[in-house]
Amino acid sequence: MPLIDVSIAEGRSPEQLRALVSALHRAAEETVGALPENTTVIIREVPSTHWSKADRTIAELRTGPDPA
């Protein structure tokens, strides 16, 4: 019973998220033989202002180079 829990920065279209769900289900089926009815996928969309890397939020990174 795979549980696939993905965190991703917000901003994807519903179609992109649906494609991600399908791809994750296929990957579980193909790699570990999981049955589709036993696989759960959770996608957590995180606001880009609440996710940071190298002391800059994703929102800041998307706006361009570090102002320092």
Image (spheres, grey):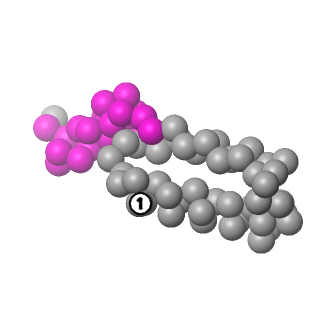
Q: Residue furthest bottom?
A: 30
Q: Residue furthest left?
A: 67
Q: Residue at x 45, y 39 (%)?
A: 45
- List x then y, in percent, for residue 24: 64, 60
Compared to residue 34, the image places residue 11 above or below, namely: above
Q: Would you say 47 lies left or right of 6 here? A: left
For the record, the magenta segment spans 45-67
- List x then y, in percent, for residue 49: 31, 30
Q: Would you say 34 lies left or right of 20 here? A: right
Q: Residue at x 16, y 35 (%)?
A: 68
- List x then y, in percent, for residue 50: 37, 28
Label 1, residues with CA under 10 Å away: few <14, some 14-19, many ≥20: few
Q: Callout 1, which amino acid?
A: Glu
Q: Residue furthest front?
A: 37
- Residue 41 among magenta residues: no
The quadrant where residue 27 appears: bottom right
